[in-house]
Amino acid sequence: MSRTPQSQTHCRPVSRLRVGRWALLGLLGAALLLTVGQVVPQSLETREQELGTLRQDIVRLQTDLEVVRSREDSLEDRLNVARAELALQQAKVSEADQALALADARVEEARTKISSLEAQLDGVRGDLRRRLVGLYRLGGQGFLRLFLAMEGRENLLPSIRQLRFLVRRDRLTIDRYVQVRDQLSEQREVLEQQLAEAEAWRGQEVERRDELKKIERRRQKLLKQVAEERRNLMARTDALQEKERKLLRFMNDLVGSEAPPLDGAPVQEFRGVLDWPARGEVVAEFGPRKDPRYKTEVPHHGIDLKLDQGTKVRAVFPGEVVYASEFEGYGPMVVVHHPGRVFTLYAGLELVNVDKGVMLSLGDVVGLSAELLYFEIRVENEPQNPRQWLR
């Protein structure tokens, strides 16, 4: 059966049109697949790098916190610990924020990929539907009928090649459909994982912000306690300084009103060989005392001896008692005038055993100590380091 030129002319353009359209769709699908398969955007890589740096900072801050905790002793140390905890928790909150932002970005990226894959799947599904409709219209022996309908039966090779092309094209379409479908399924699983990760970081962010608020409240409380301690310390410092000023004025009056120098060998000749007023532990040396935290300074013109209560306190050199009574801030106190215009002062006594005007010999008991004895040596009214006078 021969075909009319009209039918021949009609068949070839349609075939070329369909082949060209299928090729175009295949190229478009390949391009979309390549687009979906690209590496993570630079913004995500940058965020991951920033997150890694932030986590290194957290490790460093945790190490710093352990160091500060190992030194915790005073209220100021506790405040330093709170500061370190606050810095660490702020870094952890930043980590949660950054990780959450990264997780949300990955979720958005997964959704974009799913949308692209769904579009591809719809396109491939449409192509398959059109191909199936075309095959249905051709009937059960559609490819054979198409083959027989092609011109040039005397030379079957071009027709066979065209059929092979059509079959291969349909097979590639089916393969692409399966591939895109599988990719879509995998990407949906990725999206579920990314959503779960984002939700976990969202919960951690809330918990870490709550913990940050607790640490900040604790730090504020410690700041108030430190401020109160500082005020108390300043008040005690002022009281100690005023106590020392009163003693200085008292000794100035005492020295200024003193009778002519006492007879006898001056104490200066025995400098470095005098006996201690009592045997005990020196708990505060001569010289100003400086608070290590607040840098306040209090004068200290003698030494503090820790003694058993009731220990006898003895005169370190013969002399005259010029004061034996209570003195504000020092408790019961005895002042002895020695030859050479040297004065010794014994304060913090539990009991005074001498009266004003009494002459003392070396080693006479001036009183009984409380648990802490304060001892001074002055030349005229200039404080001296007792260790340079005692042996």
Image (cartoon, grey):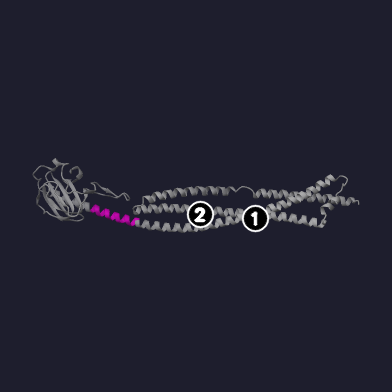
Percent position (x, y) of residue 154?
Answer: 88, 45
Name the spot of residue 183 as percent of width and height, x first: 66, 53
What residue is shown at x 55% (from left), y 56% (from top)?
198
The amino acid beneath tag 2 is Ala
Q: Which residue is mark 2?
A: 96
In the image as oriented, which residue stretches furthest toward the right? Answer: 1
Whichever of callouts 1 and 2 sits on the residue coming sooner in the sequence is 2
**Residue 262 point in image, percent of width and height:** 9, 45
**Magenta stretch bounds:** 226-242
Image quarter in which the C terminus is found: top left
Give the main secondary structure of the magenta stretch: helix
Disc number at residue 288?
none
Residue under the point 61% across and 55% down = 189
- Please say whether residue 384 is visible from this viewpoint: no
Mark 1 or 2: the one toward you: 1
The residue identified by callout 1 is 185
> Which amino acid, mark 1?
Ser
